[in-house]
Image: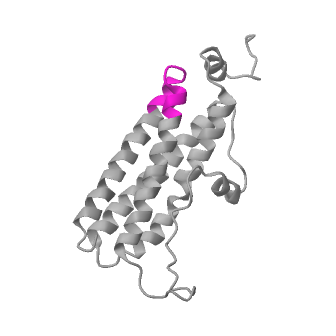
Amino acid sequence: MEPGDTSQRVAAEGLRERGCDPEELRQKRVDAAGAEFTTYYYTNLRMHLAGEEDYKEITEDARLKDRAHSELVVPRIYELEGSLPNDVRDIADRASCPDAEVPTPIDDDGCLDTSPLEVEDILEVLLEAERCAIRTWSEICDMTRGADPRTYDMAQRILNEGMDHEAWFIKIQGEYPEA
């Protein structure tokens, strides 16, 4: 690059030199940021854990950390010449993990069951959301190991927290009396 040239980023050029495709990595990070962003569903899931205050607290901790992960990832996307979609729906649609939605039980007649949700159903949704995040961040770690130390460090820290969350949800599922 010529001095003063603002059309390229040194970090993106460095990735190319080390065999990592910056565009592919940007897209994966946008998808991962979308998955972290959409954990606002945890707010709703948490409300269905009424009376299970310890579980609500763990769910809230996971929700707050996942939102922080989203905020951590976004600047790196822009640093490597990327951007987020302008429409929040597009961000959610691109998320690398499905929404952690409240399970909607259906009765034997195919109608929506309006009875209270079971705690173990909520815990299962939370566990599967963390497992998807672990797969996503493992893939980003694999892509960036040796090619993008900054993104690798960030992804590794998020991956470690996801593994902690998975362990929490497995542990509380094992402790829950009906599990």
In-image side of 5 versus 122 (left or right) = right
Q: Position of residue 115 (x, y in %)?
A: 43, 88
In-image side of 25 versus 159 (left or right) = right
Magenta segment, prevailing SS (helix, strand or loop):
helix
Q: In which quarter of the image is the N terminus?
A: top right
In-image side of 175 versus 20 (left or right) = left
Bounds of the magenta span? 140-153
Relative to 17, does residue 178 appear above or below in the rendering?
A: below
How is the model colour-coded? one colour
**What residue do we see at 44% from left, 70% from top?**
45
Q: Residue furthest front?
A: 108
- Does the magenta-highlighted stretch encompass residue 141? yes
- Does the magenta-highlighted stretch encompass residue 144? yes
Name the residue nearer the viewer: 118 or 58. Answer: 118
Q: Where is residue 134 in the image (x, y as percent from the top left)?
A: 45, 45
**What residue do we see at 27% from left, 74% from top?**
178
